[in-house]
Amino acid sequence: MGALEIFFFPVMAHGHMIPVLDMAKLFAFRGVHSTIITTPLNAHAFAKGVEKTNDLGFHMSLEILEFPKVEGLPEDCENADQIADSALLPAFFAATRMLRDQLEQLLQERRPNCLVCDMFFPWAVDLAAGLNIPTLVFHGSGFFASCAGEQMRLQRPYKGLKNDSDEFVLPNLPHKVKFCLSQIPLHERTEENSVFAKTLIEAKESELRSLGVVVNSFYELEPDYADHYRNVLKRKAWHIGPVSLCNRSFEEKAQRGKRAAISEDECLKWLDSKSVNSVVYVCFGSISKFPSKQLHEIAVGLEASEQQFIWVVRRTGDEEIEDWMPEGFEERTKGRGLMIRGWAPQVMILDHEAVGGFVTHCGWNSTLEGIAAGVPMVTWPSFAEQFYNEKLITDVLRIGVAVGAKEWVVGTGGGNVKRDAVEKAVRSIIVGEEAEERRNKCKGLKEMARKAIEEGGSSHSDLSALIQELSSYSS
Ligand code: UDP
């Protein structure tokens, strides 16, 4: 039999495209022919990775589908992070559903051995099944969040609670984890029937019709939850991460997703001038943005913490307007603070020994990149499964402190976290005995992460098992 052909079809959002590119590379490094399916304006995010993998003698390619035009969506909008207003999300998902015919034609022509399908494309799982092409689902989250999300959906432990601040314990999980009502997505607590809510239900259902789930995590990070997912929730899953660790060179770490808004060399030079574990890196992922009021509180809190920082600043509305900046802020923090207005070379920054703390929105990629780099975290979730990831970091792994975000809001934080909370959390992640303890735990996890992806490691072995299983369907 020839090499396995696997197609990867990530939703057009950097939080899914970046790990899928890494995943496709990992398969290619094992002799699989990996093909990524995307749309014209997203192709550049994959092009370099594909080219480099081929230069190394492995086999990777891109297939481009035309992004459908739908009413209400701006012409050049092909990526979720271009959506400024969450009211446009239904139009975006409607457009992705219209990719169906093009995908069908491609699958019919090429007949890959497997389609790794994004959870946001449940329709594609059924389409592939109709063509007798096995599918795997990719959610972009870890085991803890998948278990917590599923138990939340099944148990609805918040039923009967009325006030946003009412707390409850999520039952049936290996640890006792508490949430408050306002941390649960509105579409879940109100059983609202939005396009987004429907897509999530369809995703859960289609997952059960697939071969199983590929998880960007490693067993040693969340063993209780990897077991719970498989044994209690009865899901078939393969853990193959942290996938970001397939990026070994400076260039690969520095250039992921988009072009950085700062020269990588300049950023590296700045970091090189700082001592070990002395810099806090502040970044909220590819989608989250804050209103001026919240940015102002962050600026004042960061300054008051007296710590050195790299801050990736993204504002809702007109990015050029910097009305949030305290007077004289840049002059006073000169030398100890570096602001990046736009995209940061995140993995390169996190991997630098000067970085000793990460203020994160708890997106799963950022969380895992922080863990793989051995960096303790200040957690500041706002939507998706970020509140679950926060609990994993703070309550289960105990490698982070919560800033105190309480409100589930898509894309934009409401601006409710005060300067004192920022100051306190930032200082406590760098300074003191507890900071040292967290740092030591992080060091251990960093080592485990590296071992997991090396030959004989848990993720390496699970990837081998997956490739073997897929080969057995094709022989
Ligand atoms: N990222 C980056 N530079 C930025 C912002 C984000 O490289 O300025 C990358 C980050 O390393 C991660 C991804 O974008 O791989 C964001 O994914 P995550 O799951 O953390 O959050 P999302 O963007 O999906 O909310």
Image (cartoon, rainbow, N blue to C red):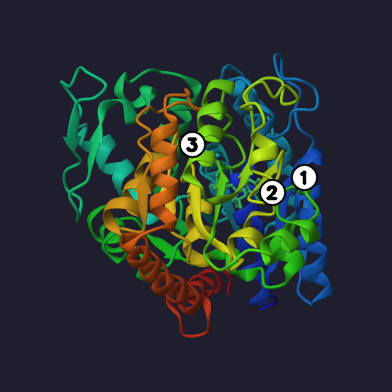
Q: Is mark 1 within 8 Å of ligand 1?
A: yes
Residue that carries the numbered disc 3 in the rendered image:
301
> Is mark 2 in CB contact (under 8 Å) with mark 1?
yes
In terms of secondary structure, where does tag 1 sit?
loop
In the drawing, does residue 26 fall left or right of residue 209? right
Mark pair 2, 3: CA separation: 21 Å
Question: x%, y% of residue 132?
Answer: 56, 53
Q: Earlier in the sequence, mark 1 or mark 3?
A: 1
Q: Which quadrant would the N terminus be assigned to in this image? A: bottom right
Report the number of discs. Answer: 3
Residue 299 showing in the rendered view: yes
- Rendered location of residue 427, percent (x, y): 42, 49
Tell me: residue 333, above or below residue 82: below
User: Which of the 4 image quadrants contains residue 274?
Assistant: bottom right
Residue at the farthest bottom position: 456
Mark 3 lies within 8 Å of ligand 1 (Cβ measured): no
Name the residue tied to disc 2. 344
Q: Earlier in the sequence, mark 2 or mark 1?
A: 1
Few, some or many residues within 10 Å of mark 1 (<14, 14–19, 20+) = few
- Tell me the kind of residue under disc 2: Ala
Circle 3 residues within 10 Å: few <14, some 14–19, many ≥20: many
